[in-house]
Image (cartoon, rainbow, N blue to C red):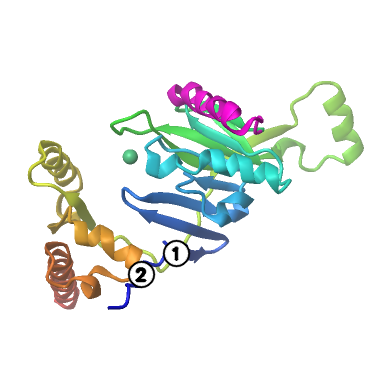
């Protein structure tokens, strides 16, 4: 019997949401890394896919291994390929332990890998690019965690000075008059074709009380936006991506695949009801 072909490694996905590219991969429990090349930042490093090396800043959401496993490798490869020192922005409470992790590599490699680790608290911000800042947002997880928004900051001449000649503006500035004001804008990529159809609860585990609580919470808050169908935690669903297949082709009979079929049926039913509501 021929040995089976080894599973295909996780492939990087790609979305173009003008003016940004969003690329990366996210398989729950395995690896998460999402990069926006135009903004010089990647969120989480996963196992450090090659594309992530081009981002000078990695913003970590939390330190579960599937989100940070590739961090020392990222620092090391950036240095090795002379791409400049890599920087990691992370929730404040884990900055110390992450520095400790990098310290542990020193005797193993008999050298010190240049790196920068910056802890960020909710509300604090740090520059990632000209005029572009990363601002921490409080999130909750079972370990210390942080969310991020990207903010663009620009200085604009105040309206009252708009008609003055350059020379006069320079004089005013020298006299210490505030002639500009700073405006902030949340960076967003608008895809007009994009709309929220609903929210799907995934990785649901009946035996786990927390799953029940989270589900009840989400339903309480988002109401009918939440689909009735829940996708259970199922090993066949997590295996499918490493075989490069959707779960429906990988194991149609598995409870995970069947849940997705049910979800599709629910989606179609909702769609039909919506159309009917519009028509009447
Ligand atoms: Zn996690």
Gap in angstroms between the C-alphas marked 2 and 1: 8 Å
Residues drawn in magenta: 92-113
Q: CB of mark 2 within 8 Å of CB of mark 1?
A: yes
Q: Is residue 267 left or right of residue 96?
A: left
Would residue 153 be seen by someone viewing this image from the given angle?
no
Indicate the quadrant containing the C terminus: top left, top right, bottom left or bottom right.
Answer: bottom left
Ligand 1 position by quadrant: top left
Please check the rendered image and state whether residue 218 is part of the magenta-colored stretch, yes or no.
Answer: no
Q: Is residue 87 above or below residue 261?
A: above
| Label 2 sits on residue | 244
To which residue does mark 1 refer?
11
At 53% from the left edge and 43% from the top edge, which residue is drawn? 150
Mark 2 / mark 1, whichever is N-terminal: 1
Which SS does the magenta portion mostly show? helix
Q: How many numbered marks, from 0 up?
A: 2
Label 2 CA crowd tier, 10 Å (few <14, some 14–19, many 20+): some
Near-viewer residue (190 or 77): 77
Magenta segment includes 102: yes
């Amino acid at each position: 019997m021929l040995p089976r072909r080894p599973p295909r490694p996780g492939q990087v996905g790609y979305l173009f949401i003008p003016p940004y590219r969003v690329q990366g991969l996210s398989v729950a429990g395995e690896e998460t890394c999402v990069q926006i090349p135009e903004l010089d930042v990647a969120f989480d490093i996963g196992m450090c896919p090659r594309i992530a090396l081009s981002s000078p800043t990695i913003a970590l959401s939390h330190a579960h291994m599937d989100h940070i496993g590739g961090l020392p490798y990222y620092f090391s490869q950036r240095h090795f390929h002379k791409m400049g020192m890599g920087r990691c922005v992370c929730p404040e409470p884990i900055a110390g332990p992450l520095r400790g992790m990098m310290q542990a590599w020193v005797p193993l490699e008999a050298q010190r890998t240049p790196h920068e680790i910056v802890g960020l608290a909710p509300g604090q911000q740090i520059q990632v690019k000209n005029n572009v800042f990363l601002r921490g947002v409080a999130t909750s997880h079972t370990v210390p965690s942080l969310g991020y928004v990207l903010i663009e900051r620009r200085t604009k001449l105040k309206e009252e000075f708009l008609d003055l000649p350059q020379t006069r503006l320079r004089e005013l500035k020298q006299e210490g008059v505030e002639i500009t004001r700073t405006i902030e804008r949340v960076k967003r990529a608008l895809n007009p074709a994009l709309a929220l159809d609903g929210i799907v609860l995934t990785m649901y585990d009946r035996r786990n009380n927390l799953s029940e609580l989270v589900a009840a919470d989400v339903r309480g808050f988002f109401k009918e936006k939440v689909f009735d169908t829940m996708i259970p935690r199922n090993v066949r669903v997590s295996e499918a991506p490493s075989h490069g297949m959707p779960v429906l082709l990988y194991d149609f009979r598995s409870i995970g695949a069947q849940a997705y079929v049910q979800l599709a049926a629910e989606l179609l039913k909702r769609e039909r009801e919506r159309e009917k509501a519009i028509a009447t």
